[in-house]
Image: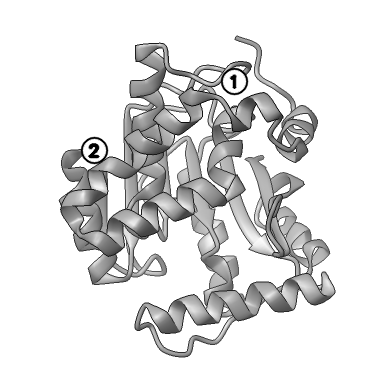
Amino acid sequence: MTQKSDGALALEALRLPSRSERHDGSWAALLDAASEPYRVAGRFAYFFARGKLRTDPVFRTLLRAGLLAGRSQVLDLGCGQGLLAAWMQAASTCHARGAWPRGWPPPPQLQSIRGIELMARDVARARKALGARLQVQHGDLREVPFGHADAIVVLDVLHYLAPDCQLEVLRRIHAALPRGGVLLLRVGDAHHGLRFRITQAADRLILLARGHGWVKTHCRSLDAWRAVLDQCGFDGTAVWMSQGTPFANVLLIGRAR
């Protein structure tokens, strides 16, 4: 299978779901399969997983645009309760059963997904729901060794770190990837006006509701994030990743030089 260019991936990611996709029963089957493991982890874990996977465009785009195509070892930094692992496992299961959205490429054949998560309650939920399907380590990503991977995913995490820590983590990510390895980094664009302010407000409310208290954030404009990626050894493509939401999120697809 020919690997898509970053430009092609960007165009595919920007495409909103068609009517046939929205009403495709295989999409509902995928959502059910990814959410079901969380029933054993409690009502919050289950309904959070189902709501997040249904409404956040990044999960659909990961599969529809084939952003992890050809990758086998994935590291999820700030993995929370392991939604990415649940999603990718459900994708493999549904594709094997023939319940797969029309027009989507086959899901990647992953050998392993590892996660690092700071919040003990999320680690406990991930372990209870997914067991051996996710190798999750409880720890601070500023301190835990990354090992090696051919794809690293960081969704809505890096802005919690101070600017110098952001640079250090990105350099360590680069060191953990082979040349051509992919980084999928979602951030907020601080120069996106009202949408960015809504993004920040929602972020802080969710943290407070989950008992994390007030957390200082360190955000950048999209141009500044691009410059940081370049400084840390990545060639990147930016993709709008707030389709259907009021937020100002952008997915940066970085390739390690």
SS of the residue under disc 2: helix
Residue furthest out toward the bottom: 214
The residue under label 2 is which amino acid type?
Arg
In the rendered image, which residue does mark 1 sit on?
Answer: 104
Of the residues tagged 2 and 1, which is closer to the observer? 1
2 or 1: tag closer to the N-terminus: 1
Secondary element at tag 1: loop
The residue that appears at 58% across and 46% down in the rendered structure is: 58
How much space separates mark 2 and mark 1, taking CA atoms? 24 Å
Residue depicted at 46% across the width and 46% down the height: 176
Question: In the visual, does 240 lie left or right of 158?
Answer: right
The one nearer the camera, 224 or 79, is 79
Q: Is residue 62 depicted above or below 66 in this figure?
A: below
* Numbered tag placed on residue 138 in the rendering: none
Q: Position of residue 122 (x, y in %)?
A: 28, 64
Left or right of 51? Residue 198 is: right
Q: Quadrant of the N terminus?
A: top right
* Label 2 sits on residue: 133
Q: Residue flagged by tag 1: what amino acid is it?
A: Trp
Q: Is residue 50 above or below residue 3?
A: below
Q: Is residue 195 above or below residue 94?
A: below
Viewer-proximal residue, 101 or 116? 101
| Residue 73 x/y as whole percent | 39, 33
Q: Which of 44 and 61 lies nearest the eye of the viewer?
A: 44
Q: Residue at x 47, y 54 (%)?
A: 52
Residue 135: give x, y in percent of width and height.
24, 46
Q: Tell me whether the residue at label 2 lies in contact with that at label 1, contact meaning CB atoms closer than 8 angstroms.
A: no
Q: Residues within 10 Å of mark 1 (few under 14, many from 20)?
A: some
Quadrant occupied by the C terminus: top right
The quadrant holding residue 133 is top left
